[in-house]
Amino acid sequence: MANVEIYTKATCPYCVRALGLLERKNIDFKRIEVGDNPEKRATLRKKADGRHTVPQIFINGKGIGGCDDLFELEESGELDKMLS
């Protein structure tokens, strides 16, 4: 099974939407809540090549982008391939 990490903020509707898709697909993931934590936000920026918006989703260490990117992968069938 793939290693999935998602960086989120509690008040972000895109994060809620992305988390919902992962949960509906019964995908195990690690959620990292960045909130107003400067250390976690710095880690996110470094890992995401300077991007700081949330959600930022990583599958097996590879950044796939945010919510819209996740749904595009789902619609194209590529998400299941990445997760297997």
Image: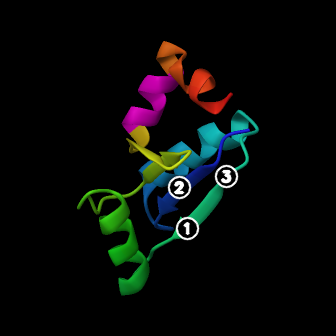
Other residues around mark 2 within 10 Å, as few (<14) / some (14–19) / many (≥20): many
Q: Is 40 displayed left or right of 42 in the figure?
A: right
Query: Disc 2 residue type?
Result: Ile
Label 2, on which residue?
6
Residue 22 lies, in percent from the top left, at 64, 41
Label 2 element class: strand
Above or below, 1 relative to 33: above
Residue 21 lies, in percent from the top left, at 61, 37
Q: Are marks 3 and 2 in contact (CB under 8 Å)?
A: yes
- Is 72 magenta? The answer is yes
Numbered label attached to residue 17: none
Q: In the picture, residue 50 is in which quadrant?
A: bottom left
Q: Are marks 2 and 1 in contact (CB under 8 Å)?
A: yes
Tell how many labels: 3
Residue 40 lies, in percent from the top left, at 43, 78
Q: Residue furthest top?
A: 76
Label 3, on which residue?
29
Q: Which residues are magenta?
A: 68-74
* C-alpha gap between disc 3 and disc 2: 7 Å
Numbered label attached to residue 32: 1
Query: Disc 1 residue type?
Result: Ile
